[in-house]
Amino acid sequence: MHMGRTQSYFRDKVALITGASSGIGQELAWQLAQSGAKLTLAARRKVRLDALAQKIAGCGNSDALVAECDVTRDGDLDRAVEATVRKWGRLDVAIANAGFGVVGALKRLSLEDYRRQFETNVFGVLRTIYAASPEIEKTKGNLVIISSVAGWISTSGGSPYSMSKFALRALANAITPELQPGGVKVTLISPGFVDSEIQKVDNQGEFHADRKSSVPGWIRMSTPRAARQILSAVARGKRERIITLHGKIGVAIERFSPWMNRAIARSSDRSPG
């Protein structure tokens, strides 16, 4: 029932997705195409975007515009939105999905590492919002911010990433009531561990195809399932959706018994290896 309602909501909608070349962004694009949405695929890796656009065209339900785009560069998102409106005539949904993780202990990192993290994960989202929101306001559409459970729970060795995701949650909480009178719906998505390529990207934002995930497979949610839950939350106008069971449990503990998360973190830091 939810799936049918979700597909109906997105049918003929025009959606722009950043970070569409892999992982959650790629799967969101594919599922939106199945719903009959018109798409703009934005990312740095144009070869991957072209392959995805070809796959989408082959399914017969949709069409896709490819926009080679780096969310850290001023102007790229503005051009992607302009191209979208030129091709489709409007923009209904903008999904700010592009991001990566800088990890490491404080003493092993530099200010430049933190700046690099924020340039993509925070300012890249802001560039997306500033570029898209004038068109989204016209259609009374949706802004979707892909954050993380790390925006609720910070762990040692992950301060740059968690800081960036805490910032996104603060941003979403602040702009939701600001944009609501104009009919714009903001949805914050906070996934836990999901199958994606984020752990294949190093601290400089470079992709390494042969890098293995350190997260056990049993705890990771499949990308298609995560994308279905994300799109359902957007279609239902949810303000925030926590994705994955372990993510929901962790956030609930953080909200109501935060000392438990601190105790778990201390125990992990003391454990060998």
Image (cartoon, grey):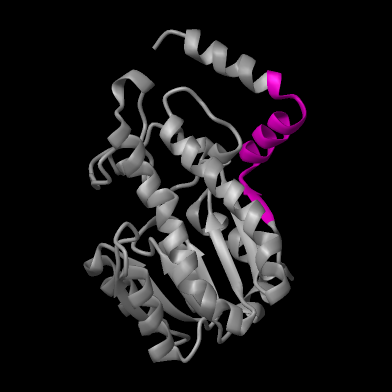
The x, y position of residue 228, in whole percent, is 59, 62
Residue located at (24% from left, 68% from top) = 46
- Residue 71 sits in quarter: bottom left
Task: Please tell me whether residue 203 belongs to the stretch shown in magenta.
Answer: no
Q: Tell me where the magenta segment starts and ends, as one range.
A: 240-259
Rendering coords of residue 164 (x, y %): 47, 42
Q: Residue furthest front?
A: 178
Please say whether residue 242 is one of the residues in the magenta stretch: yes
Residue 265 versus residue 240 in the image, above or below = above
Q: Please name whichever residue, 62 or 256, is drawn nearer the observer in this view of the structure.
A: 256
Q: Position of residue 193 (x, y in %)?
A: 51, 41
Q: How many marks?
A: 0
Q: Specify whether 177 is left or right of 50.
A: right
Where the C terminus falls, by quadrant? top left
Identify the residue shown where x is 48% and y is 77%. 33
Outermost residue on the right side: it is 256
Asked whether 217 or 9 is in front, the reply is 9
Quarter of the figure that contains the N terminus: bottom right
At a point 33% along the width and 18% down the height, the residue shown is 107
- Identify which residue, 11 or 153, lies in the foreground: 153
Viewer can see residue 64: no
Q: Is residue 242 above or below residue 93?
A: above
- Res 78 seen here: yes
- Quick check: 106 above or below 243? above
Q: Main secondary structure of the magenta part?
A: helix
Q: Residue at x 32, y 43 (%)?
A: 116
